[in-house]
Image (cartoon, helix red, strand yellow):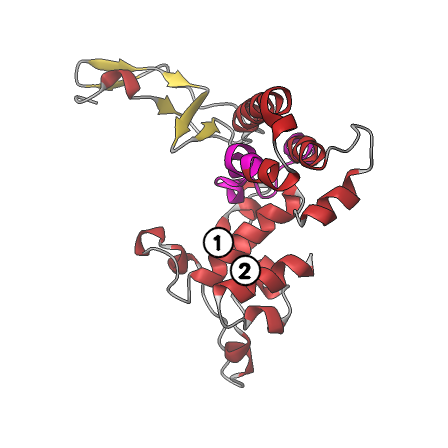
């Protein structure tokens, strides 16, 4: 705070089913910090109920801005392959950034992000606005948004025990392999302990809860992939 008071913000996170705790401000030295409804952290907008509505709105607004500029200014000069590269750089990267935080959100919020991807696919393939989008996504080998979220979580799980993730992630501390006193089969299968969650939907959305459930639902052949690239390829085709 002493280094940059203007960028110091206070966010009180609470359940959307309960009233926000009463706190008008926080006194730190000679500074009064007033609570805010949403704030940005590492490019992700967190709100006070962690529903990520503000974040999704910002992503959609920025993505449609870039799609509009690409369509109007440079699309006619680009091939489909070049357009796809530009779309990945300016749009898909935004949709995929920290998207594992969006697991378990209501369908209407995910649908907003899906509309961005649909528009991007139409732009790349020059298809009509009202053409069915599923064949277009299949031709481009693009996973829908809800699958991309699950894909990211499972990739993080795969990387954690295989020492592929940076040490500061600490994700491996949230994962526990199931061990049986009767058989070593569960260990060799790489099953994870699925912790119970009493706080819904917040508990079910946490990485420690949803990641083991998603991982254990994968076929053993996918979980035993010998490399990250192989894992990504077989996982993508499994959706």
**Horizontal arrangement in the rendering, residue 20 relative to residue 164 (left or right):** right
Which residue is rendered at x = 63% and y = 19% of the image? 72
Q: Is residue 81 above or below residue 150?
A: above
The kind of secondary structure element at disc 1 is: helix
> Tags 2 and 1 in contact by the CB under 8 Å rule?
yes
**Quarter of the image where the N terminus is located:** top left
**Horizontal arrangement in the rendering, residue 217 relative to residue 30 (left or right):** right
Q: Residue furthest front?
A: 77
- In the image, is residue 108 part of the stretch drawn in magenta? yes
The kind of secondary structure element at disc 2 is: helix
Q: Residues within 10 Å of mark 1 (few under 14, many from 20)?
A: many
- The residue at which mark 2 appears reads as 212
Q: Is residue 159 above or below residue 41?
A: below
- Horizontal and vertical percent position of residue 187: 50, 77
Q: Is residue 189 above or below residue 18?
A: below
**Horizontal arrangement in the rendering, residue 186 relative to residue 80 (left or right):** left
- In the image, is residue 42 part of the stretch drawn in magenta? no
Magenta span: helix, strand or loop, mainly? helix
175 or 116, which lies in front?
A: 116
- Horizontal and vertical percent position of residue 71: 64, 24
- The region drawn magenta spans 86-115
- The residue at which mark 1 appears reads as 208
């Amino acid at each position: 705070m002493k280094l940059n008071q203007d960028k110091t913000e206070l966010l009180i996170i609470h359940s959307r089913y309960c009233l926000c705790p009463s706190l008008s401000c926080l006194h730190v030295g000679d500074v009064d910090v007033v609570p805010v409804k949403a704030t940005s952290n590492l490019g992700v907008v967190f709100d006070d109920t962690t529903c990520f509505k503000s974040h999704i709105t910002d992503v959609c607004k920025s993505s449609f801005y870039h799609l509009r500029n690409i369509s109007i200014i440079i699309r006619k000069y680009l091939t489909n392959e070049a357009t796809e590269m530009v779309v990945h750089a300016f749009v898909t990267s935004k949709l995929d950034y920290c998207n594992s935080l969006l697991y378990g959100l209501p369908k209407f919020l995910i649908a907003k992000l899906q509309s961005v991807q649909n528009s991007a696919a139409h732009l790349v393939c020059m298809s009509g606005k009202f053409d069915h989008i599923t064949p277009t996504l299949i031709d481009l080998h693009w996973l829908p948004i809800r699958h991309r979220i699950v894909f990211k979580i499972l990739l993080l799980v795969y990387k954690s025990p295989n020492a592929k993730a940076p040490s500061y992630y600490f994700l491996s501390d949230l994962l526990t392999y199931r061990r049986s006193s009767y058989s070593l089969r569960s260990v060799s299968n790489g099953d994870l302990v699925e912790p119970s969650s009493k706080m819904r939907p917040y508990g079910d959305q946490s990485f420690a809860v949803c990641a083991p459930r998603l991982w254990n639902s994968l076929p053993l052949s996918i979980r035993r992939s010998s490399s990250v690239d192989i894992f990504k390829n077989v996982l993508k085709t499994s959706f």
